[in-house]
Every structure is written in structure tokens, then in C-alpha cells.
Image (spheres, rainbow, N blue to C red):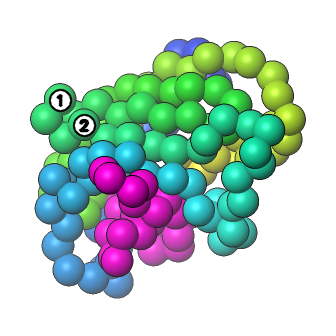
Amino acid sequence: MLLIIGGVFVSCSSVPKNSGESQDVSQLQGKWLLSALEENPFSQNPQQKEAFIEFDTGTMQVSGNSSINQFGGNFAVSEPGSIAFSPMRSTLMAGLNMETENLLYKAFPRVTAYLIEDDILSFLDSSGTVLIQYTKAAGS
């Protein structure tokens, strides 16, 4: 289900057993650029806005851009490596290749965990499947 304004990107669960070492929430801090979605590499279209997610671990707020629309909300980490997003706010503009945005918004509710390895942030579902990947932005 895709709900953008007042939409819900909610997830909560324990960290999958294969997620590796414990994750420190401070590692999320900063800006991350979208690099893969639903196991497919993502290439930024120069005619669209930069697709990214940005975490502020001091306020536990998240914001970003899906390459067309801006989104934002809060996040919670109940235990190392788990993550839950509050209902997200989003702008409602149309643009080129809405498919990327639709896939991204469909993946967020399935996210239950995160893993950071070598400046790659992976969001996983409850079975440990990588749904979304971001690469740490330079200077973040």
C-alpha cells in the first residue's frame, strides 16, 4: 500500500540472526546516497534530484529525497541493528521515472533492520533480505 501524505513507513522487529556485528546508532548519522533498490543497482538520472536519506541521530529524525519527492519523519532503534520509522511526510510532485520512488516507498514498510559495512548502509527485511542500499556521501 502506498500512502504518501500521512503514509506509514513503519517497521519493527528484531535484527535478523545473520546481520553481523552489533550496530551503533551513531553510525547512521549523516547523508547516504541511494545505490541499490530491491536488489537492482540504482543510477542517478542527472535530470532528477539526488536520491538520498539523511539521519540526525541527535534528534532521531530522518529526511531525504526519492529522486522526485522529499520525505521526512522520525526513526527509532530499540536494539542495536533494528530500526523503525514513524509515519513519513512527503511532497507530492510527479516526475520522470516514478517507478524508483514507488519501489522505495513500498520497501520502507518492510524494513526491520539495518547493517553498515564499509560505508554501505543496507536496510533488511525480517528474513535478512536486503531491500535498499545507500552509500555514505562524501563529507558526511
Give residue 3's quadrant in the image: top right
Can residue 8 be seen by looking at this rendering?
A: no
Please state if 33 lies on the left or on the right of 106 as rendered: left
**In the image, residue 27 lies in the stretch drawn in magenta:** no
Q: Nearer the viewer, residue 108 or 36?
A: 36
Q: CA distance from mark 2 to mark 1?
A: 6 Å
Residue type beneath disc 2? Asp
The residue located at (36%, 34%) in the rendering is 62
Please state if 27 lies on the left or on the right of 91 as rendered: left
What residue would you read off at disc 2? Answer: 56
The residue located at (52%, 63%) in the rendering is 133
Q: Height in image: 11 above or below 95?
A: below
Question: Helix or strand or loop: what does disc 2 sit on?
Answer: strand
Q: Position of residue 90 (x, y in %)?
A: 56, 21
Q: Confirm or deny contact between disc 2 and disc 1 (CB under 8 A).
A: yes
The residue located at (25%, 63%) in the rendering is 81
Give residue 55's quadrant in the image: top left
What residue would you read off at disc 1? Answer: 59
Q: Position of residue 107 (x, y in %)?
A: 59, 50
Q: Nearer the viewer, residue 127 or 70?
A: 70
**In the image, residue 120 lies in the stretch drawn in magenta:** yes
Can residue 115 be seen by looking at this rendering?
A: yes
Please state if 40 lies on the left or on the right of 120 as rendered: right
Magenta part of the chain: 111-140
Q: Height in image: 14 above or below 54?
A: below
The residue located at (62%, 17%) in the rendering is 91
Q: Position of residue 10 (x, y in %)?
A: 43, 38
